[in-house]
């Protein structure tokens, strides 16, 4: 996967490498929820309801291959699998927090008045 890719390091190389590892529609959300602690697969599915089982499995495998997520399988019936961040994954805490903060600002967490909603609809309808 991405960690085996070689980069011709230009000015944007570190950004490109980072986005290769944590980019994608669901990886950021997976990492965000795992910052809270260890979660089972089903718990992640509940916290990210729009992700399909296939995509969640694929992204978890990629994050595991990148060394950001640890997968612990317990020999029980039924099998129990837990996911947690590795120490390397924990280093993304500041990055994920910054993304969350930026998103809150971008979305304007302060509830916009009805006029602002109408303006957004008018712009979207152009």
Image (cartoon, grey):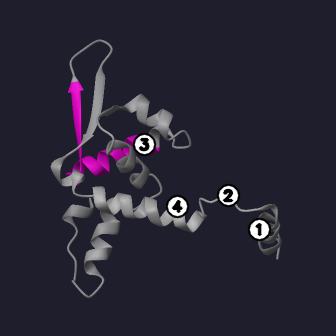
Mark in front: 2 vs 3: 2
Q: What's the residue at 27%, 71% (across, down)?
A: 17
Which one is nearer the viewer's eye here, 121 or 97? 97
Mark in front: 1 vs 3: 1
Q: Which residue is mark 3?
A: 56
CA gap between label 2 and label 1 equals 10 Å
Label 1 neighbourhood size at 10 Å, few (<14), some (14-19), many (20+)? few
Q: Is residue 105 magenta?
A: no
As drawn, the label of residue 104 is: 4
Q: Position of residue 90 (x, y in %)?
A: 23, 51
Image quarter (top left, top right, bottom left or bottom right) of the C terminus = bottom right
Q: Which residue is mark 2?
A: 111
Q: Which residue is mark 1?
A: 116
Q: Quadrant of residue 123?
A: bottom right
Mark in front: 3 vs 4: 4
CA gap between label 1 and label 3 equals 35 Å
Q: Position of residue 13 (x, y in %)?
A: 26, 80
In magenta, the rendered stretch is 55-73
């Amino acid at each position: 996967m991405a960690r085996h890719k070689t980069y011709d390091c230009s000015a944007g190389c570190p950004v490109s490498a980072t986005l290769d590892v944590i980019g994608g529609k669901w990886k950021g959300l997976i990492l965000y929820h795992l910052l809270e602690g260890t979660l089972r697969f089903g718990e992640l599915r509940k916290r990210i309801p729009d992700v399909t089982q296939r995509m969640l499995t694929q992204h978890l495998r990629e994050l595991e291959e990148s060394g950001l997520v640890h997968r612990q399988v317990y020999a029980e019936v039924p099998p129990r699998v837990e996911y947690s961040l590795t120490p390397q994954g924990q280093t993304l805490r500041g990055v994920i927090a910054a993304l969350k903060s930026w998103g809150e600002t971008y979305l304007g967490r302060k509830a916009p008045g009805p006029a602002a909603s109408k303006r957004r609809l008018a712009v979207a309808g152009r």
